[in-house]
Image (cartoon, rainbow, N blue to C red):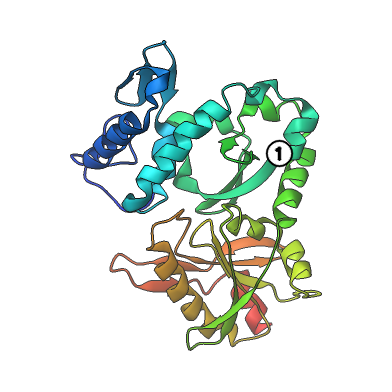
Amino acid sequence: MGFLNFGKKKSAAEVDPDLEDLTKDEAATLRQLFADFWPTAEGTITVHGDYAESSSGGQFGLYNLSRAVKLEPEQNWPQVVERHISGLFSRSSAPKDSDLSDDEILSLVKARLIPSAYLPESHRGQFSYRRVIVNDLEAILMLDYPEAVSTVPDAIVSRFDADRLWQTAIAAVSAEPLDEVQTLDAGTGPFHLIATDSMFTASRALDIPALLARVGVASAPRGVLFAVPSRHHLAFHVVEGPSALQLVHGMSQFAQMSFSEGVGEISANVYYWSEAGYEQVTTFGEDGSVMVDGTGAFFAAING
C-alpha cells in the first residue's frame, strides 16, 4: 500500500524503491502475480516499478494493490490480486469518484480510523482534511463501494460542508451491522471485543457514545478504555473505578497479540475516551516494555 507503514521496520536495502511498503522480494512477487492473473483476452501486460501497462495503452497503478496485499498473509496474495484485477474491469465503465454526484458521495462515504503513518509525506497534501484523533491515530474519509474502497481527496471534500460530511461518514460506520460482542478476560478483568470482517470495525471508536448505545450502555461518566489493534478489532471497557488500571495490562496484551497478526494493523497501544476527548494511555519503551501514562484524564477518572 503506498500509503501504509506497518511498523515492522525494514532496512533501507530491503525496501522496494517503487512500492515503499514492500520489500524487494515482496514487490517482485506482487508484480509477477499481477502478470500471471492478467486476462489474456485483454492483451499483453508489462509490469513496471509501480504500475502496469497493457498492450492497448491502459496504465494501472500498483500502489493500492500493494496496500491491499500487505494487509493479508502472503499465501492469500493470489486471491487478492485476482480480485483486484477483476475489480478493475468491473469498475472500468463506472463513473470516477470525481464524477459522482453529491448524493452519491454521501451514500458511499465512511470514516476510517488509520495509523498516523498511513499516509507518507508525498501523499499527505492531497488529504489535508484528515483529523488527528490522538498522537498516533488519525481519521480519513473513504468511499465504500461493494467490491472496493477509495480514499477521498481534498478535491471532493471541498464540495461539501466539512462537518456535515464527517457526520455522515461517522454515522455510516456506526450503523454497520453488529452481530456479536464478545467478552474477554486476560486475567486482569473483563473487556468487550467487536471483531468483524469489515475494514471499518475499529472506526467505531470515532463515535464512542454511538457504540455504547448499540451495546446497551446508557452512559460512561468515567470514560472508556479501548484498543484498536487492527481495522477488524475494537476492544473496549467502560471505566468504573481504580480496577480499570489493572485491566489496561490485559487489554495491552490483547492489542499486541492482534497487532502482531499483521492484517490491517492500526496500533498496539491502549487509549482512553471521555467527553473531553481522546488520549493515549500506553506507550512502549525501547526495551519493548509497556508504560502507562499516569498524568492524564484516565488517571483523573479512576481516582476521582
Which quadrant of the rendered structure holds the N terminus? top left
Asked if one can make out residue 275 in the rendered structure from this viewpoint, the answer is no
Whether residue 278 is situated above or below residue 224 in the rendered picture: above
The percent position of residue 218, horizontal first and vertical second, equals: 81, 75
Displayed quadrant of residue 23: top left
Q: On the rendered structure, is 52 left or right of 28?
A: right
Which quadrant of the rendered structure holds the C terminus? bottom right
The percent position of residue 136, horizontal first and vertical second, equals: 50, 53
Q: Residue at x 63, y 61 (%)?
A: 278
Crowdedness of circle 1 by 10 Å Cα count: few (<14), some, many (20+)? some
The percent position of residue 21, horizontal first and vertical second, equals: 34, 41
Q: On the rendered structure, is 236 left or right of 185?
A: right
Q: Nearer the viewer, residue 298 or 207?
A: 207
- As shown in the figure, which amino acid type bears the numbered disc 1? Leu
Q: Residue at x 24, y 35 (%)?
A: 28
Whether residue 129 is situated above or below residue 245 in the rendered picture: above
- Secondary structure under tag 1 reads helix
Q: Nearer the viewer, residue 169 or 274?
A: 169
Give the residue number, with chain letter if any, for mark 1.
Answer: 108
Q: Nearer the viewer, residue 143 or 284?
A: 143
Whether residue 73 is situated above or below residue 283 in the rendered picture: above
The percent position of residue 88, horizontal first and vertical second, equals: 51, 28
Q: Residue at x 65, y 66 (%)?
A: 273
Asked if one can make out residue 234 in the rendered structure from this viewpoint, the answer is yes
Whether residue 168 is situated above or below residue 34 in the rendered picture: below
